Each structure stands twice: as structure tokens, then as C-alpha cells.
């Protein structure tokens, strides 16, 4: 099943930072779009996480240098 997409604009400096983080993720994300989708999904998600999901999120955030 295919999803519909929309285009958004972000400052080029932000995009460049995202590209850098994608490269530093050592394959965790394949491109900036995948990274942005992951971050936005994490932010807008209102569900509670299981302890295992929380650990996975923390692991990924540590890999990205956020924690």
C-alpha cells in the first residue's frame, strides 16, 4: 500500500545538519527523509511505550548523540 506524501520546506542549514546526523548514524537511517520521519513520528506519537520500546528509543537517541 502506497502512502501519499506532501512537501515541506526547512532551512538548508537544518537539512545539512540532518544529513550529517544520517551519516553519523552508521546506517541507522538511509537518508534524511527516513531520519525526519522517525523524529516526527516520535514527537507526534501520543501513545505510551513499553519498557522495551523506551529502551530502543533511548538507544537510538544515544547513537545520535542526543543523550
Image (cartoon, helix red, strand yellow):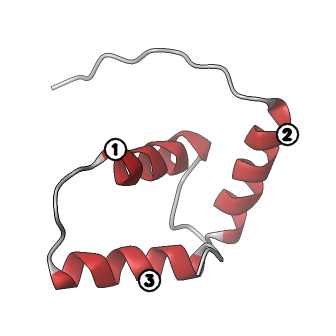
In whole angstroms, how far apart are the C-alphas of marks 1 and 2?
23 Å
Image quadrant assignment for residue 22 = bottom right
Name the residue rendered at 57%, 19% in the picture: 8
| Position above or below: 44 against 21 | above
Q: Quadrant of residue 9?
A: top right
Q: Nearer the viewer, residue 8 or 19?
A: 8
Marks 1 and 3, how far apart at CA:
19 Å
Give the labeled residue for mark 1: 44
What is the number of the mark on residue 59?
3
Single out the mark in the foreground, 1 or 2: 1
- Whole-percent x, y for residue 35 in the image: 53, 51
Residue that appears at 74% across and 39% down = 15
Q: Is residue 3 left or right of residue 63?
A: left
Q: Residue at x 26, y 23 (%)?
A: 3
Pick whichever of labels 2 and 3 is earlier in the sequence: 2
- The reply to whether dot 1 and dot 3 touch (C-beta < 8 Å) is no
Name the element at disc 3.
helix
Q: Badge 2 is on which residue?
A: 13
Q: Quadrant of the C terminus?
A: bottom right
State if disc 2 and disc 1 touch (CB < 8 Å). no
Along the polypeptide, which appears first: circle 1 or circle 2? Answer: 2
Mark 2 residue element: helix
Instruction: State the image coordinates of residue 66 (x, y, percent, origin top left).
Output: 61, 74
Amino acid at each position: 500500500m502506497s502512502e501519499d506524501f506532501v512537501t515541506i520546506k526547512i532551512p538548508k542549514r537544518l537539512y545539512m545538519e540532518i544529513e550529517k546526523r544520517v551519516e553519523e548514524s552508521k546506517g541507522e537511517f538511509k537518508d534524511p527523509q527516513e531520519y525526519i520521519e522517525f523524529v516526527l513520528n516520535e514527537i507526534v506519537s501520543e501513545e505510551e511505550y513499553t519498557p522495551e520500546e523506551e529502551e530502543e528509543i533511548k538507544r537510538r537517541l544515544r547513537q545520535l548523540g542526543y543523550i
